[in-house]
Amino acid sequence: MKHIFNKGKVPTKPTLLLLHGTGGNELDLLPLAGMIDDEASVLSVRGNVLETECQDFSKDWQKVF
């Protein structure tokens, strides 16, 4: 699974997990992470489901529920 991991300035803080919506990718929510906590680590992953030519997590979440 494609992803981006940015190690935070304070390693004891919880890691922010970013999951984009349909049509997005692992880069879309990175600016939001800095607004939430600019010292936390960030893990942003790309959905591996190709639906209508857009990456998303929809089928992955159906497996969970």
Image (tube, rainbow, N blue to C red):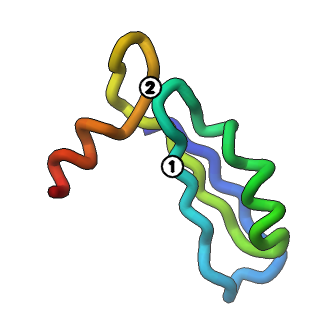
Image coords of residue 44 (percent x, y): 59, 50
Image coords of residue 15 (percent x, y): 60, 72
Which residue sits furthest bottom? 12
From the viewer's perspective, tell me whether residue 47 is left or right of residue 63: right
Q: Would you name the residue on which mark 2 appears? A: 55
Snapshot quadrant of residue 55: top left
From the viewer's perspective, tell me whether residue 65 is left or right of residue 11: left
Secondary structure state at the residue bearing disc 2: strand
Give the residue type at disc 2: Gln
Give me the residue at 36% from left, 39% from top. 57
Give me the residue at 57% from left, 30% from top. 24
Seen in the picture, residue 25 relative to 9 is either above or below; the reply is above
Mark 1 surroundings: few (<14), some (14-19) or many (≥20) residues within 10 A:
some
Q: Would you name the residue on which mark 1 appears? A: 19
Give the residue type at disc 1: Leu
Tag 1 near tag 2, CB within 8 Å: no
Q: In front: 4, or 29?
A: 29
- Sequence-wise first label, 1 or 2: 1
From the viewer's perspective, tell me whether residue 1 is left or right of residue 8: left
Q: State the quadrant of the N terminus.
A: top left
Q: Which mark is residue 48?
A: none
